[in-house]
């Protein structure tokens, strides 16, 4: 058993609404039943209580750290480096025809 | 043979005392006997392994063998290996036979090592107990009612049960070190950027790092010599001179300054773990090291920061799984949005979906600054804590995990409790530092305890030296569970 009591639970505790969870599920392209929405809502609320502890930290003047090493991205010559492997890649696709990936009709 | 070090195996192979085919077959037979209960491997492909073994024997006969030529190495199922089923522990990739090799796999292939099989793992490396795998939980070889840790739990169990000579893992928040600790083996997460992420299925790209897991620091050094290296296909791969990670193994530890962060020995640490770690520190003093009290004041913030940043990156990385080009597609669907939503809902497990949801939420309009940017700012504070600490010490030591291996199912219903088991490891990933875990004794229920050694950037050779000297003086690393 790990003893851990988030300090700022009460101050920053936020509860997500069912609509919030439905909206996020839609953005994340995850189908969910009503029961799943409710379970997810309860669990996410617990996790956001944990995360809320961050809000009390004064970060004025601190630069966001997006990466472990502060390096600029390497650039490479804009030349073809890959060979065509369409057959190998499409051999593992769910549905292909004539070298094309098949999906339900997007435009009527 | 199963207790031999990588160096001893290499010597035996080069001296023709055993062939790679014989050695590989020995391991395959042992796996066939013990794996059904442990579930450490998701995929075995004996024919492919033996083809490699025969090629290795040709190379051994020709005298062109390298350190790992002919040695059976298990690969975490997060690494794409050409012609091998590569599932990442997910139903989403249940039928994904990789058309290409990860850079790490290429490095092992070039060295003539044998791919012995793909090890079980938490789904998309999201978990600390290996219970989120679509292919079933892995059992801890020391007590089969307990978890091996995660996410590299299959690798840790395989190494501990002597089902491979050594193996690979990956570590985003502790996924090499925590299972190494819970299974009583050694594991190293290198400095971010040392091993290429190319072909390693992405979880949180700014944190993910591959590393070796094995029975001793000496073995890890040999593994690192093969795994590490620049690769232009990973935009964050570091361009550095080739290193011999074994070069400092034999240096004495006289004068080594060990920093002990008071936050690692505070409330929440199991007393059995504390006792074993303190005994290890005492051993280090005997070996000539001195101890310095240090502070990493933002340690506790590493968990909230991690559970914003890692899911944010994951939600973006995992958007590629849409049922179009590879992997799982739902059998029944209407329009294209329905196909995406059903394929993802059915293909991902509960923990993965949970993290995608967290990540999508913190990146969404209105919350981006409050969560994502704030977490990145605190990430810098956490990294600065280490920079400050290394002004006073050479390495930092403490426990790897707050407790020994817990029971299967014990934390299944409470994601927050599971997340807290990574309290000592996460900050290392956020800072991009190298960290390792080595066995340092046994705690409650006779389960192994891990000592964490955190180094400064690119200090892997020194950390391996520090671990190796301890392993010369103690025998915790050579203890094995009963088969």
Image: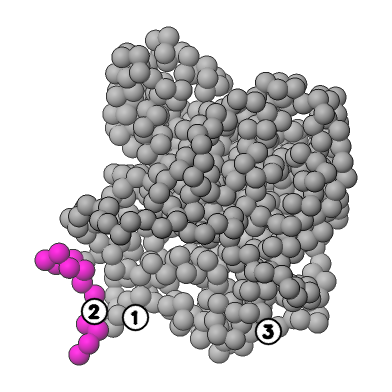
Disc 1 element: helix
Q: Residues within 10 Å of mark 3 (few under 14, many from 20)?
A: some
In the rendered image of this protein, does residue B19 appear above or below residue A31? above
Q: Are marks 2 and 1 on the same chain?
A: no
Chain under callout 1: B
Q: How far is the residue under mark 3 from the one under mark 1?
A: 28 Å
Tag 3 residue:
A15
Residue ID at (71%, 70%): A62
Magenta segment boundaries in residue numbering = A96-108
Observer able to see residue B184? no
Query: Which numbered disc, 3 or 2, marks the residue that appears first in the sequence?
Result: 3
Q: Locate residue B214, reporting x and y percent.
A: 57, 32
State yes or no: discs 2 and 1 in contact (Cβ < 8 Å).
yes
Q: Are marks 3 and 2 in contact (CB under 8 Å)?
A: no
**B173 and B256: which one is in front?**
B256
- Name which quarter of the figure residue B422 lies in: bottom right
- SS under mark 3: loop
Q: Residue at x 64, y 69 (%)?
A: A64
Q: In the rendered structure, find residue A104 and report the number of the disc placed on it.
A: 2
Q: Chain of mark 3?
A: A
Mark 3 vs mark 2: same chain? yes
Q: Residue B357: give x, y in percent of width and height.
A: 54, 74
Q: Secondary structure at mark 2?
A: loop
Residue position for label 1 = B338
């Amino acid at each position: 058993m790990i003893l851990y009591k988030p300090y700022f639970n009460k101050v920053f505790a936020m509860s997500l609404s069912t609509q919030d969870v439905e909206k996020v599920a839609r953005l994340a392209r995850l189908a969910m039943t009503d029961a799943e929405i409710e379970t997810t809502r309860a669990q996410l609320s617990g996790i956001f209580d944990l995360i809320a502890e961050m809000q009390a930290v004064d970060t004025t003047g601190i630069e966001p750290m997006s990466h472990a090493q502060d390096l600029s991205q390497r650039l490479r010559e804009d030349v073809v480096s890959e060979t065509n492997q369409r057959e190998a890649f499409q051999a593992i696709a769910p549905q292909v025809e004539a070298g094309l990936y098949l999906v339900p009709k997007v435009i009527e | 043979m199963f207790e031999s070090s990588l160096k001893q195996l290499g010597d035996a192979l080069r001296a023709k005392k055993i062939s790679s085919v014989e050695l590989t077959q020995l391991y395959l037979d042992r796996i066939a006997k013990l794996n059904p209960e442990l579930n450490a491997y998701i995929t075995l492909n004996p024919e492919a392994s033996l083809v490699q073994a025969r090629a290795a024997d040709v190379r051994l006969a020709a005298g062109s063998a390298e350190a790992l030529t002919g040695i059976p190495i298990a690969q975490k199922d997060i690494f794409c290996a050409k012609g091998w089923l590569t599932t990442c522990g997910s139903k989403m990739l249940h039928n994904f036979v990789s058309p290409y090799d990860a850079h790490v796999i290429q490095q092992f292939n070039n060295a003539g090592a044998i791919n012995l099989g793909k090890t079980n793992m938490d789904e998309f490396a999201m978990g600390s107990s290996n219970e989120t795998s679509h292919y079933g939980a892995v059992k801890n070889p020391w007590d089969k009612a307990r978890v091996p840790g995660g996410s590299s739990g299959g690798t840790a169990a395989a190494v501990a049960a002597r089902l491979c000579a050594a193996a690979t893992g990956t570590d985003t928040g502790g996924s090499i070190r925590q299972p190494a600790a819970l299974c009583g083996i050694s594991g190293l997460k290198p400095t971010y950027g040392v091993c290429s992420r190319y072909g390693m299925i992405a979880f949180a790209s700014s944190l993910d790092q591959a590393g070796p897991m094995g029975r001793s620091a000496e073995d890890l050094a040999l593994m690192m010599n093969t795994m590490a290296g620049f690769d232009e296909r990973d935009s964050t791969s570091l361009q550095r001179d080739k290193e011999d990670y074994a070069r400092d193994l034999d240096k004495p530890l006289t004068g080594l300054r060990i920093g002990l962060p008071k936050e690692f020995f505070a409330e929440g640490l199991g007393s059995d773990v504390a006792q074993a770690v303190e005994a290890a520190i005492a051993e280090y003093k005997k070996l000539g090291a001195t101890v310095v009290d240090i502070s990493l004041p933002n340690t506790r913030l590493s968990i909230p920061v991690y559970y914003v940043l890692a899911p944010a990156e994951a939600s973006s990385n995992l958007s590629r799984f849409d049922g179009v080009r590879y992997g799982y597609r739902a059998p029944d669907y209407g329009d294209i949005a329905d196909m995406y939503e059903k394929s993802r809902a059915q293909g991902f497990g509960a923990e993965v979906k949970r993290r995608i949801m967290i990540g999508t939420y913190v990146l969404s309009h209105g919350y981006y600054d409050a969560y994502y940017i704030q977490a990145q700012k605190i990430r810098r504070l956490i990294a600065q804590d280490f920079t400050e600490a290394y002004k006073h010490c050479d390495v930092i030591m403490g426990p790897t995990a707050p407790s020994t291996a817990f029971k299967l199912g014990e934390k299944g219903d409470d994601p927050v409790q599971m997340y807290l088991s990574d309290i000592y490891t996460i900050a290392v990933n956020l800072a991009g530092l190298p960290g390792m875990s080595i066995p340092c004794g046994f705690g409650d229920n006779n389960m192994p305890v891990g000592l964490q050694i955190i180094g400064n950037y690119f200090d892997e050779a020194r950390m391996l030296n520090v671990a190796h000297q301890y392993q010369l003086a103690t025998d915790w690393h050579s203890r094995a569970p009963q088969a």
